Amino acid sequence: MTLDVNLLRQDFPILSREVRPGIPLVYLDSTATSQKPRPVLEAMEAFYRTNNANIHRGVHTLAEEATAMYEQAREKVAQFINAPSAEQIIFTRNATESINLVAYTWARANLKAGDRIILTEMEHHSNMVPWIMLATERGVELEFIPVTPDGLLDLDVYRTLLTRSPKLVAVSGMSNVLGTINPIAEIVRLAHAAGAITLVDGAQSVPHLPVDVQALGVDFLAFSAHKMLGPSGIGALYGRHDLLEKMPPFMGGGDMIKTVHLRSFAPNDIPHKYEAGTPAIAEAVGFGAAVDYLNKLGMQAVAAHEHEIVNYALDRLEEIPGVKVFGPTADKKGGVASFTLEGVHPHDIAQILDRDGVAIRAGHHCAQPLHEKFGITATARASFYVYSLPQEVDALVNGIYKVKEIFG
Amino acid sequence: MDDLYRELIIDHYKNPQFRGHLDPNDIHFEDDNPLCGDHIEVTLRVDGSGKVADGRFDGKGCAISQASADLLIESIIGKPVEDVKKLSKQDVLDLLGIELGPVRLKCALLSLKVLKAGVYGLGESSEALIE
C-alpha cells in the first residue's frame, strides 16, 4: 500500500498556511518536530472540552473518563511498538527524559566506577550528555562505536569493544543527521551475548519505521510523541518488565507512591512508580490519536514513502555542483538529507531558503561530536515525513540554486 | 537581490579587506558563538595617541558574522580606542544596513562582542558588552 500524500496533507491544517503573503510553507524540518494532523488536534481539544479531570485518584465521572483515556493511550503506544504489556510503557516528557530516567535509576543503581558503557559517535546529545554526566559523577567509562566515512557504524570495532564486558550499550535507532538506520537487532543480539543491557534512542526510528521491541529484543526504548505526529510535552520509555520492577523510582511525588508516612514511602507498581505528579494527560490522549493515525497509514507504507522521497532528494541534491550530502546511500537511511554547499555557511542557506517558505534546519542538530568527526561545524538538513512531496524537494533544490546565485 | 544578502554583505564575505592576524599586536581576543560554531578572532595595533593604527579579524562562520567583522574593523581604523569602547549594537546594524531576527543578530554581533572584550582587556566576552 502506498500513501496518498495529496489526500493526507488535507489533514494537516498548517501545511496550507503561507509563511508570508503568497509564499506557501514547504516544511522540511520533520526530524526536529513533525506537524500534527487534525485527529490529534481534535482529540486533545475534545478532551479539554468534555473530559478534563485529574487522573487515578478521582471517583467522579470525569476523573474516571480521564483516567480511562490516559490508560487507553498507554495501551495504544504499547501496541504500536509491540510491547508485551501496557505497564511497560512509562510516559515521560520526551525521549530525552526517558533516557535520563534510565541513567538516573537503572544506571545509578547498577553501575560503578570502571564499568563500561558503549555509545556511538552518531548519538544525539540526548543519548550522550546523560552518560557523560554519569561518567563524571561515577567514574564509569564511555566507549564509542566509530562512524565510517559513509555514515555507518563500524561493527567490527563494536565486536572488539564488547569483549571488554560493557554493562550497557546505548545506541540510536536512526541518526537524526545522517539518517542512517542502524542494525538494531544485530547490535542488541551481540550486546546480550556479551552480557550488556541495551537502550535504543528511538526518537527518529519509532516515528519513521516499523519498530517491534520483542523482535528487536531491546531492553529499553526511548521516544517522543512530537516527532510522530503527536503533541510536544510527552514521550515514552519502554522497559523490560523485570528491569522496571527492580529499578528505584525516578522523581518523587504524587501518584508514584502506594503509601506515604512522615519519614518513609512505598513506591507504586509500574508504570506509575515512574510517573510522579500530574502527567501530560491531554497530550497522552493526543499521543494515542497520533498512533491511531500512523496505524491507519501503516508503518510499512510510511517507511516506503520516506525511502522514495529521500532517494529522490539525494539524486537531486547530488546533481548540484558544490553540494556534499552526508550519510549512507538511500537504501540504508530514513528521510533525512544533511548537506553542505561549498563556500556558503549552512545558516545562510537556511536563511535564504526561508525567504521562499522552505523550512530546513542548519547547525549541528544536537550532534556536535558527529560533526567534529566529519571536520565540519554545521550542516544544512532537509527532512521528510508522511506529508512530504517530491515538489517540495524541487523547491529545496531551486532554493539552493538561488543561494548559489546570490553567493556567486 | 534578497535584502538580507545585500551585495555589500556578500562582497565583504567573499572578499574581506581585513581578514588576517596582526603579529605583534596590542590587543588580541577571540570567541565563539556556541549556537552555530561561528568563530571570530580580532587583533589590533594601537598607536602612541591611543588610536587604532591597524586591525584584522580571522574566523569562520556565516556571511553575516564574517561580513560584519570586516565592516567593523574597517570602521574603527584610525579611531581612538576610547571611541571603540562606546560602539553599540546599533552601530553594527547601521554598518550592515539590514534588519535581523534574534538568531541572526547573534551572528552579526559576535565581532563586536569580541572586539569590545579585547579593548576592555577582559578575560571573557559578555552579552552586556553589546547592549
Image (spheres, rainbow, N blue to C red):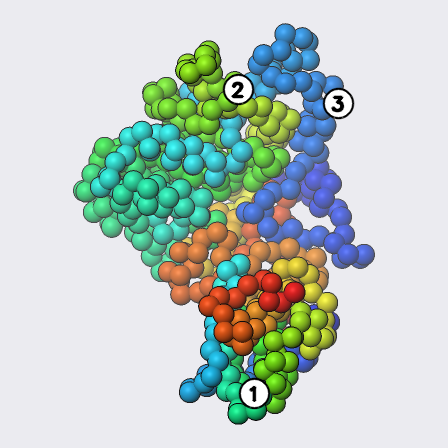
Give the number of marks. 3
Q: On the picture, is B90 further left or further right than A245? A: right
Q: CA distance from mark 1 to mark 3?
A: 69 Å
The kind of residue tagged 1 is Gly
Point out the residue furthest to the top here: A59
Q: Nearer the viewer, residue B84 or A280?
A: B84
Answer above or below: position of A81 versus B89: above
Compared with A61, A232 (above or below) is below
Looking at the rendered image, the quarter that the N terminus of chain A falls into is top right
- Name the residue at the front extreme: B49
Q: Chain of mark 1?
A: B
Question: Disc number at residue A160?
Answer: none
Percent x, y of residue A86: 48, 19
Residue depicted at x 28% and y 30%: A110
Select label 2 or label 1 by which is in front: 1
Give whichever of A224, A406 is nearer the camera: A224
Label 2 lies in what chain? Answer: A
Residue A12 falls left or right of residue A217: right
> Which mark is on residue A254?
2
Give the quadrant of the C terminus of chain A: bottom right
Q: Check residue B50 in the rendering and tell me which mark sits there, or answer none.
A: 1
* Nearest-to-viewer mark from 1 and 3: 1
Q: Residue furthest right?
A: A21
Callout 1 secondary element: loop
Between A138 and B64, the residue placed more toward the observer is A138
Q: Position of residue A145 (x, y in %)?
A: 30, 49
**Which of pointers 3 and 2 lies earlier in the amino acid sequence?**
3
Q: Are marks 2 and 1 in contact (CB under 8 Å)?
A: no
Q: Secondary structure at mark 2?
A: loop
Tell me the kind of residue under disc 3. Answer: Arg
